[in-house]
Amino acid sequence: MSRRRRQNPLSQFQPGQKVVLRDTAIFLLKLWIDGLKDVTLTFVSLAATTIDLVLGPRKNGYLFYRVMRWGERFDLWLNLYGASEAAQRSREGLFGASRAGDDTFLGELEDLTGGERR
């Protein structure tokens, strides 16, 4: 008796295996970039705190808090997990959940690799 695979009614909207492989590579790249950011911000924040403790605050406040704002803006740009839910419901995976040219890592990457695919 042959086993038939049950057809998922949503499969027509899900990404194919090549798209999942590409999205895995993109996710791993984003994880690596995020880790590099964390290591960098560790040392930059320690240096900023040292400067703040020695010299005191500047006109625009402490350097430490400026470093934190840089990290926050970078996290918003990288948007590590932001497209994950919508990606599973699109044939284009992560690229289907973003727009080419958006001010995010994924939007810039999509723009770089050929723009909208829909």
Image (spheres, rainbow, N blue to C red):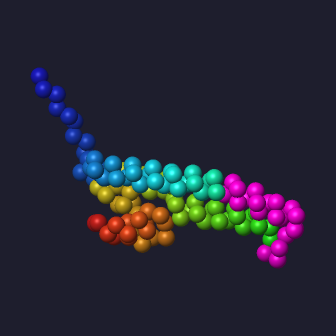
Image position of 8 with respect to 54: above or below: above
Image position of 113 with respect to 40: above or below: below
- Residue 21: x percent and y percent? 33, 48
Among all residues in the image, which is located at the extreme bottom? 59
What is the quadrant of residue 54 in the picture?
bottom right
Q: Quarter holding the C terminus?
A: bottom left
Q: Give the range drawn in magenta.
A: 41-60
Tell me what residue is drawn at x 57 percent, y 54 percent.
36
In reply to whether residue 58 is colored magenta, the answer given is yes
Among all residues in the image, which is located at the extreme left? 1
Q: Quarter holding the N terminus?
A: top left
Image position of 24 with respect to 54: above or below: above
- Residue 39: x percent and y percent? 63, 52
Res. 87 in view: no
Tell me what residue is drawn at x 20 percent, y 34 percent.
5
What is the quadrant of residue 41 in the picture?
bottom right
Res. 75 in view: yes
The number of callouts visible is 0
Residue 107 is left or right of residue 19, and the answer is right
Of 59 and 42, nearer the camera is: 42
Tell me what residue is drawn at x 83 percent, y 64 percent.
52
In reply to whether residue 53 is colored magenta, the answer given is yes
What's the magenta bit mostly, secondary-structure-wise? Answer: helix
What is the quadrant of residue 110 in the picture?
bottom left
